[in-house]
């Protein structure tokens, strides 16, 4: 049994409404991160100036590098550019964890990763990775997912027998495909499917003349494909929530009254009323929640989180017998600035 309420992580998230603050946010993030990456480059080059050195201060600003999961043209890349503008350098990686590693190793400044879809729910892998890697949430973006049906130039709709894409994208366009009599074939990635048609590396029975891909319009542009139809998803409320993660927070760039969202993850003692008492700390201060979720976590992750928490508090490690058979983490998003008096008291 856990002994005390253990606050494991508190990170600030700036709300960016439909990209309207993208230019301002880019300026804040650039100011927060470019000197950090510049100093690393200087140190790696041998003889360069360190943090605060004159060579760094005279060096022109480097373009912001943001990691995302997927092939070029993926929805994650489109979300990144929608949030931060066209000039950002988007760096594709094959897995979510490699995106975390790219930021932790200073290869990239940020990672833009999905954490929740309005139809499919939470992406738990990224929640777990956020706890394993010491990165901070600095922004969130709600991205509207529009699926497009794309083919090679000259292919007509009545020629299409197969549609290839990620299984989730195919499921979200199921009624549309059934109406056209098109057989769905799952592949590893949405943008990757567009790439497969462009390169002619297709599954059995599929040819560039009888196969379409379901992906973003950005993928169609990158791979030279023609969009036969847009917004083919069955549900027009398909949104994905992305988080922008970096090595540093941006609290120092924001005022206490800046509209914000704060995310916390915590464990609770296995006693009556523990969750009620934890949430009452926020409710009594009129702090609104935007999300709360609990899910089982592995013993190894929970031990790691307890170890980190105890390192900060100076408590002794607990034994395995302290842990219940079912171990839960609670994920909570509340609408207040991390530095506000109410949030600090809660």
Image: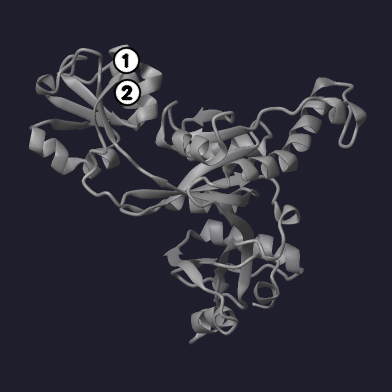
Q: Are marks 2 and 1 in contact (CB under 8 Å)?
A: yes
Gap in Å between the C-alphas at discs 2 and 1? 6 Å
Q: Is residue 86 above or below residue 110?
A: above
Locate residue 192, reporting x and y percent.
Answer: 36, 26
Q: Which mark is residue 194?
A: 2
Give the number of marks. Answer: 2
Q: Give me the disc on residue 198.
A: 1
Quadrant, the C terminus: bottom right
Mark identifier at residue 65: none
227 lies left or right of 291: left
Q: Residue 214, image x and y in percent? A: 27, 31
**Which residue occupies the foreground of this view, 296 or 262?**
262
The residue carrying pointer 2 sits among few (fewer than 14), some (14 to 19) or many (20 or more) residues within 10 Å by Cα, namely many
Q: Position of residue 144 (x, y in %)?
A: 38, 45
User: Is disc 1 placed on a helix, strand or loop?
Assistant: helix
Which residue is at 85% across, 21% downward?
46
> How crowded is the residue under tag 1: few (<14 C-alpha within 10 Å), some, or many (20+)?
some
Query: In this orientation, does residue 49 appear?
Result: yes
Q: Is residue 98 visible?
A: no
Q: Is residue 183 left or right of 152 when viewed as pictured?
A: left
Q: Is residue 31 above or below residue 58?
A: below
Residue 276 against residue 155 in the figure, above or below = below
Q: Residue furthest front?
A: 20
Q: Residue at x 55, y 67 (%)?
A: 335
**220 and 120: which one is in front?**
220
């Amino acid at each position: 049994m856990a002994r005390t309420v253990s606050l494991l992580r508190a990170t600030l998230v700036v709300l960016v409404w439909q990209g309207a603050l993208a230019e301002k946010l880019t300026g804040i993030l650039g100011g927060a991160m470019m000197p950090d990456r510049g100093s690393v480059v200087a140190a790696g080059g041998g003889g360069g100036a360190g943090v605060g050195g004159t060579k760094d201060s005279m060096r022109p600003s480097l373009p912001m590098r943001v990691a995302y999961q997927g092939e070029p043209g993926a929805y994650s890349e489109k979300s990144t550019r929608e949030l931060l503008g066209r000039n950002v350098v988007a760096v594709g990686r094959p897995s979510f964890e490699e995106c975390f590693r790219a930021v932790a190793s200073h290869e990239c400044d940020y990672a833009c990763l999905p954490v929740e879809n309005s139809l499919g729910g939470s992406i738990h892998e990224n929640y777990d990775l956020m706890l394993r890697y010491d990165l901070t949430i600095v922004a969130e973006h709600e991205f509207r997912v529009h699926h497009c049906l794309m083919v090679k130039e000259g292919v007509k709709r009545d020629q299409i027998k197969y549609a290839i894409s990620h299984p989730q994208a195919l499921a979200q366009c199921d009624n549309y495909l059934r109406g056209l009599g098109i057989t769905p074939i799952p592949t590893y990635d949405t943008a990757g499917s567009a790439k497969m048609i462009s390169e002619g590396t297709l599954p059995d029975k599929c040819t560039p003349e009888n196969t379409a891909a379901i992906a973003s319009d950005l993928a169609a542009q990158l791979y030279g494909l023609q969009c036969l139809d847009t917004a083919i998803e069955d549900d027009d409320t398909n949104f994905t929530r992305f988080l922008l993660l970096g090595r540093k927070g941006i609290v120092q760039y924001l005022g206490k009254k800046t509209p914000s969202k704060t995310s916390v993850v915590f464990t609770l003692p296995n006693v009556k009323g523990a969750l009620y008492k934890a949430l009452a700390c926020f409710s009594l201060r009129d702090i609104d929640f935007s999300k709360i979720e609990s899910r089982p976590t592995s013993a190894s992750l929970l031990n790691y989180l307890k170890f980190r928490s105890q390192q900060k508090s100076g408590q002794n490690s607990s034994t395995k017998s302290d842990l219940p058979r079912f171990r839960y983490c609670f994920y909570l998003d509340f609408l207040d600035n991390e530095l506000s008096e109410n949030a600090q008291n809660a």
